[in-house]
């Protein structure tokens, strides 16, 4: 089993837009149920106002490296990435659980 963790934050030059963030968060929450390779999916907004914190966290699990590729290259995931790119930056890590 692999865990895929992604931290997201608004790009420094992007103004806060609650409607945009709400719409993107809704899409992110729904994505986990729409991609068969995903076995576990959690997405949440950061609750602490500290400079070191990112705005959102995603934790997902897949069976193996092939399932991770199936998820990462799935058209729904690719579409969301394209929509997030202008507004957010992210960092990711993958590890065995």
Image (cartoon, rainbow, N blue to C red):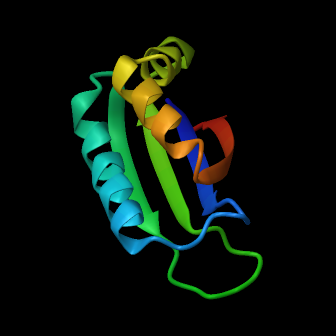
Residue 67, percent from left and from top: 45, 17
Name the residue at 51% across, 35% down. Answer: 81
Residue placed most toward the observer, 38 or 95: 38
Residue 21, percent from left and from top: 41, 63
> Left or right: where does residue 31 sit relative to residue 49?
left
Residue 7, percent from left and from top: 62, 55
Name the residue at 51% across, 33% down. Answer: 82
Residue placed most toward the observer, 21 or 48: 21
Task: Kindly give the residue lying farthest to the bottom in the view shown.
Answer: 49
Is the residue 64 above or below the residue 53 in the image? above
Is the residue 75 above or below the residue 18 in the image? above
Task: Kindly give the residue lying farthest to the right in the view shown.
Answer: 52
Task: Answer with the quarter of the image where residue 62 lies.
Answer: top left
Is the residue 5 above or below the residue 1 in the image? below
How many tags in the picture? 0
Name the residue at 51% across, 11% down. Answer: 66
Task: Answer with the quarter of the image where residue 26 lies.
Answer: bottom left
Task: Kindly give the residue lying farthest to the top in the view shown.
Answer: 66
Task: Answer with the quarter of the image where residue 93 lies.
Answer: top right
Name the residue at 59% across, 46% down. Answer: 86
**Quadrant (top left, top right, bottom left, bottom right) of the C terminus:** top right
> Left or right: where does residue 71 sit relative to residue 11?
left
């Amino acid at each position: 089993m692999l865990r895929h963790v992604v931290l997201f934050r608004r790009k420094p030059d992007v103004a806060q837009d609650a409607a945009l963030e709400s719409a993107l968060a809704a899409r992110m929450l729904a994505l986990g149920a729409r991609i068969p390779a995903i076995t576990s999916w959690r997405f949440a907004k950061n609750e602490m106002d500290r400079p070191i914190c990112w705005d959102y966290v995603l934790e997902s699990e897949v069976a193996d490296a092939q399932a991770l590729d199936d998820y990462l290259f799935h058209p729904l995931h690719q579409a969301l990435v394209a929509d997030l790119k202008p507004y957010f930056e992210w960092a990711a890590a993958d590890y065995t659980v």
